[in-house]
Image: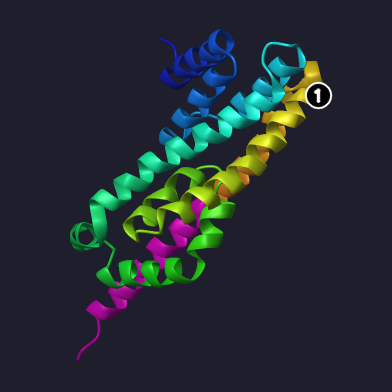
């Protein structure tokens, strides 16, 4: 039985081959909505295709950046639909999560949200997730679109140009970008493990407090 992700990747790759630059834009929009889809594969492949004359280089960069913005907007509106009160209600029902965690996240986003949206576009997983708190906090839409477009333009251009310049060795971009993705995911997993461990420890101490 084939891996569902592999099947989708093959379908998206075929879409790029058939539609050219607009297909690459659709691929990146889908990658924003479904993080397991690898932009580290699609973008260098688009660059390689452009080097062979299969699509225009500038069009590939333009369409993929537009796709990034469209995918991010869908998640932004999901966050806006959820809103603060729903997030607080969900937090109350989650084990190991306190409503104060939501407040701290809101305070952090108020201070660092612009940088998070901009630089988050260049990090796996976070480039999708960061759009949701931006919507929850109702970051002004022009600001969100501008930061998303700017960060995506840098990321997309870098990987597309790498694929364009490497030619037949374009797959090396995916390989090395994969190392970065793995490092980011390991760091995120470590942070999550630390959060769970510290929260369990704190609650255990609280249960033994005689007061």
* Horizontal side, residue 37 vs residue 151: left or right: left
Q: Nearer the viewer, residue 92 or 155?
A: 155
Locate residue 9, reporting x and y percent.
50, 19
Local crowd at mark 1 within 10 Å, few (<14), some, or many (≥20)?
some
Locate residue 189, reporting x and y percent.
49, 51
Q: Nearer the viewer, residue 179 or 28?
A: 28
Residue at the limit of the structure toward the front, as seen here: 142
Q: Which portion, as a residue range, is magenta?
A: 188-211
Which residue in the structure is indicated by mark 1? 166
Looking at the image, which residue is at 51% across and 54% down?
117
* Dominant SS type (magenta): helix
Q: Which quadrant does the N terminus fall into?
A: top left
Locate residue 42, reporting x and y percent.
60, 24
* Horizontal side, residue 37 vs residue 87: left or right: right
- Relative to 155, say whether 174 is above or below: above
Q: Is residue 210 magenta?
A: yes
Q: Is residue 122 magenta?
A: no
Q: Which quadrant does the C terminus fall into?
A: bottom left
Q: Quadrant of residue 58?
A: top right
Looking at the image, which residue is at 49% across and 28% down?
37
Looking at the image, which residue is at 63% across and 41% down?
153
Label 1 sits on a secondary structure element that is helix
């Amino acid at each position: 039985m084939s891996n569902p992700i592999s099947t989708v990747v093959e379908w998206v790759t075929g879409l790029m081959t058939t539609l050219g630059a607009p297909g690459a834009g659709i691929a990146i929009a889908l990658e924003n909505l479904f993080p397991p889809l690898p932009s580290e594969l699609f973008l260098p492949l688009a660059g390689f295709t452009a080097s062979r004359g299969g699509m225009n280089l500038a069009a590939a960069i333009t369409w993929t950046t537009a796709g990034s913005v469209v995918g991010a907007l869908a998640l932004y509106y999901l966050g806006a639909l959820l809103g603060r009160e729903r997030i607080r209600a969900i937090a109350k029902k989650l084990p190991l999560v306190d409503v104060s965690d939501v407040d701290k996240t809101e305070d952090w986003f108020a201070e660092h949200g612009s940088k998070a949206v901009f630089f988050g576009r260049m990090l796996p997983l976070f480039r999708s997730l960061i759009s949701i708190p931006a919507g929850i906090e109702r970051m002004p839409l022009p600001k969100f679109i501008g930061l998303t477009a700017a960060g995506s333009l840098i990321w997309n251009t870098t990987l597309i140009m790498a694929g364009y310049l490497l030619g037949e060795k374009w797959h090396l971009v995916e390989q090395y970008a994969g190392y970065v993705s793995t490092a980011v995911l390991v760091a995120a997993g470590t942070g999550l493990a630390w959060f769970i461990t510290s929260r369990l420890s704190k609650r255990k101490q609280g249960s033994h407090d005689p007061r």
